[in-house]
Amino acid sequence: AQSVTQLGSHVSVSEGALVLLRCNYSSSVPPYLFWYVQYPNQGLQLLLKYTSAATLVKGINGFEAEFKKSETSFHLTKPSAHMSDAAEYFCAVNNRGSTLGRLYFGRGTQLTVWP
Amino acid sequence: ETGVTQSPTHLIKTRGQQVTLRCSSQSGHNTVSWYQQALGQGPQFIFQYYREEENGRGNFPPRFSGLQFPNYSSELNVNALELDDSALYLCASSPQSSGANEQYFGPGTRLTVT
């Protein structure tokens, strides 16, 4: 089974500062990788996904993530945080080549943005 | 284009009761997955339905069951409710059953078992 680790259950940044949310996966074969955001009392919204050779993936709302095979990582970044970015962020993976769209999620990182 | 919808939004049940949660998939999507999200945790995969058949199941007991209908909407049924079943239940649809496809999530149903 896949394992996803999100380092830091809570991250706090000032408005305008760099956002860095960490995600590591466990499998030896690089999986499909996703970042989702969850606002209070809402479902999950897809920010971006990695499924192919392009290691730097750009998503919505100015977020991007870089796939690093050697580090088994897929960290999420945003150059300048906005108050509206405050939410919970989940990294998720799915087995490459699988016909079952089963997502394995990390425990989430709560992002707080200070004015 | 209508997104994924779920009903009800909230409900409260008593231990031992049964509950049915409903999900309408996004237009054109034939695959529906259900996830359980306990407080402070990431979502956990319950099962997936593809073209009205169960396509895969996570580590949940048989009292969690489901259905998918010809219009690809779906139900999640939970029998003999336990206190630990209190959680947000998320439904997600995707264009087909493939690991590469992103899943589109509904707003969830918040279930409280007392």
Image (cartoon, coloured by chain):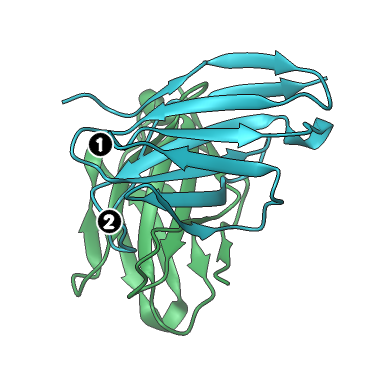
Chain colours: A green, B cyan
- Residue B101: which numbered mark, if any? 2
Chain ID of residue with mark 2: B
**Which percent across, then down, holds residue B24?**
35, 28
Q: Quadrant of the N terminus of chain A?
A: bottom right
Q: In this view, does A41 lie to the left or right of A93?
A: right
> Is residue A67 among what the camera can see?
yes
Quarter residue B68 falls in: top left
The image quadrant of residue A74 is bottom left
Task: Tell me, yes or no, if residue B108 can be seen here.
Answer: no
The residue identified by callout 1 is A61
Percent coordinates x, y for residue B109 in the rendering = 54, 24
- Counting from the top left corner in percent of width and height, residue A77 is at 36, 51
Most foreground residue, B106 or B24: B24
Q: Is residue B15 above or below residue B59?
A: above
Residue at 20 percent across and 33 percent down: it is B27
Q: What element carries label 1?
A: helix
